[in-house]
Image (tube, rainbow, N blue to C red):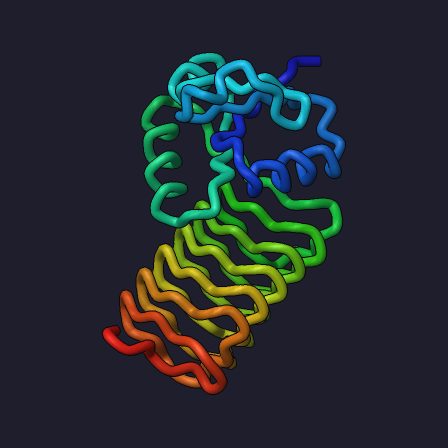
Amino acid sequence: MPTERLLIIGAGGHAKVLVSAVKSVGLATVSLGVADDNPALEGQLFCGLPVITPVGAGLQDADCFHVAIGDNHAREKQFRAALAGGAAPYTVVHSGADVAAEASIGDAVFVATGSIVAAQAVIGDGVIVNHGAVVDHDCVIGQFTHIGPNATLGGACVTGSRVLIGAGANILPQVRLGDDATVGAGAVVLNDVPDGTTVVGVPARPIQGD
């Protein structure tokens, strides 16, 4: 049986979660590698795997890749570079996640354990749906967005690209979050948030200077 080599890009905390999720699915036809651009990590063991540096060196032997970096902009940059290098993006859905058959999941998405992606939700490329997060029915999540642990998006919410939704935040149904918007941890968002705006609090309001 042929084996695909999956390269995990990034050797930080989020990558540890990603490796665990891959193992939870029990993919017998996938072998794992880890690469990072930090030269100090060369050859060190990460979750039992030797780190390859730089990322480009790891991609030379990879069939597919997943960028395990929490920062939205860095994740997008590495995704586009890896894609240009010819490797295929790889989506990881933890065995403990609940993803509706009617949901649409993009490339190189990570759906963590305990999270829910409901019917007719659309998850864009490179999105992280972290532990215990809920993406309700008919939501549309833009590329390279990060939905933090235990955050909840009500039905038909829409986000732009590279949105960061903090842990425990609640986005009410049909609210729209613009590109590069940030929602603080625990915030309750009642109204649309413009591009590049950071909102915090209950109810959520823009922070001074935004």
- Image position of 48 with respect to 80: above or below: above
- Image position of 2 with respect to 64: above or below: above
Query: Could you say which quadrant of the image residue 133 lies in?
Result: bottom right
User: Residue 118: in sight, yes or no?
Assistant: no
| Residue drawn at the location 46% of the way across and 80% of the way down | 201
Residue 148 % position (x, y): 54, 60
79 left or right of 20? left
Query: Could you say which quadrant of the image residue 134 lies in?
Result: bottom right
Q: How many marks?
A: 0
Observer-nearest of 23 and 83:
23
26 left or right of 171? right
| Residue drawn at the location 63% of the way across and 41% of the way down | 17
| Residue drawn at the location 39% of the way across and 36% of the way down | 79
Residue 100 % position (x, y): 66, 59
| Residue drawn at the location 37% of the way across and 82% of the way down | 205
Residue 107 % position (x, y): 48, 42
Residue 61 % position (x, y): 48, 13
129 left or right of 55? right
Q: Quadrant of the N terminus?
A: top right
